Amino acid sequence: MNVSNETLPTAADTGAVPKSASYYGRPIVKPHVWKPYIAWYFWIGGAAGAASVECVCARMRGADALATVEKRAALAGVLVAPVLLIADLGVPSRFINMLRVFKLTSPMNLGSWILTAFGGAIGASTFAELLGWKRTSRALEVVAAGLGPALTVYTAVLVADTATPVWHEAGDTLPFVFAASGVASAGAVGVAFAPSQQNGSARRLMIGGAIGLLAAGAAMEKRLGPLLGEPYRTGTGGSFRATSGALSAAGIVVGLLGHKNRTASRLAATCVAAACVLERFAVSAAGKQSAQDPKYTIEPQRARLNARRDLDLESSG
């Protein structure tokens, strides 16, 4: 929340700066300027990574129709995801330039390589399948599945590596939110498009992932505490989060009660997929809200300093 110079007293006026104010009320951390493309990118990439794992698992069980659906979903995701990323970057060469180096310490650089390698594997597998090279296609599916989990959660690691308060402080729980969302989304795809006789495992993934999403989100808020959890309860971030939770709950209930009805199953899948999309939008919006208001940066820092001071006093005493 930006405050005008007139509404924020300065040290010269009062001799003190308000408790949670920055210089002239300006944000201490620069809010992100992402377009909605990035939230969609987070969701599509996460779903594609999880779908590649479900593809291999379904193939091992002999559920080839489900495996094909998940493979097509992974391929579609990896074709769309770079387009969304480049659309936000504005210049295609920026994505290509990230592949000029390889840095394990850079989540953005590592993520670019994961996305590229995953896309190459799932694309080559599809091409080999069209040529009738079954063994080669199956082997490449396994390669893609090996990269899938990293593709699903790397974006959570990426945002947690920034100074944005609600992302940085949730670095140990945010990957679980993204993982649960990816699993639920991949399951929803299988429920919606695979034959009913083969989508039992997809239904379990969808429902389990939706439950995991609710649990991981609650754990993240608890980890953030009352103050830093505010952006997930108020404003745009809170609206997205509340709607996501309601849709997740609806998808779980309809998925459990209407599992024998095709229409009900697809309704449940739609609810869960929409919940996962909105969760990504909630994370994006909450991050921006927490960066705009200086209190989310200042108060946690002050609390850590006070805790450290108390610990030093106890040690010296």
Image (cartoon, helix red, strand yellow):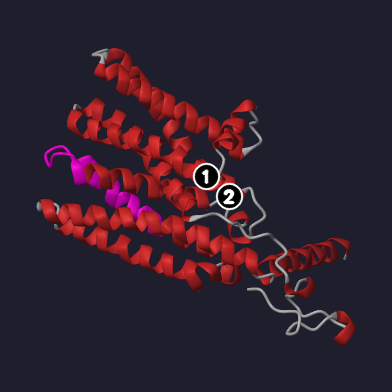
Estimate how packed mark 2 is, as few (under 14), some (14 to 19) or many (20 or more) residues with alpha carbons within 10 Å: many
- Does 199 lie within the magenta span? yes
Q: Which mark is residue 159?
A: 2
Magenta span includes 156: no
**Main SS of the magenta segment?**
helix
Residue 242 horizontal/vertical position (percent): 40, 68
Under mark 1, the amino acid is Thr
Q: CA distance from mark 2 to mark 1?
A: 6 Å
Q: How many marks?
A: 2
Q: Is residue 54 left or right of residue 285?
A: left
Quarter of the picture containing the C terminus is bottom right
Q: Is residue 273 left or right of residue 305?
A: left
Q: Are marks 2 and 1 in contact (CB under 8 Å)?
A: yes
Whether 278 is drawn above or below 41: the answer is below
**Can I make out residue 187 in this image?**
yes
Percent of width and height locating residue 266: 18, 52
Measuring from the top left, give residue 75's x and y in whole percent.
34, 33
| Foreground residue among 31 and 211 | 31
The amino acid type, in three-letter code, at marker 2 is: Val
- Could you tell me which secondary element the residue under label 2 belongs to? helix
Tell me the SS state at disc 1: helix
Q: Give the residues drawn in magenta, as a range.
A: 192-214
Image quadrant where one finds the N terminus: bottom right
Q: Position of residue 193 (x, y in %)?
A: 19, 42
Residue closest to the far bottom: 14
Q: Which residue is denoted by mark 1 in the rendering?
A: 155
Residue located 53% across and 63% down the image? 286
**Residue 269: numbered disc:** none
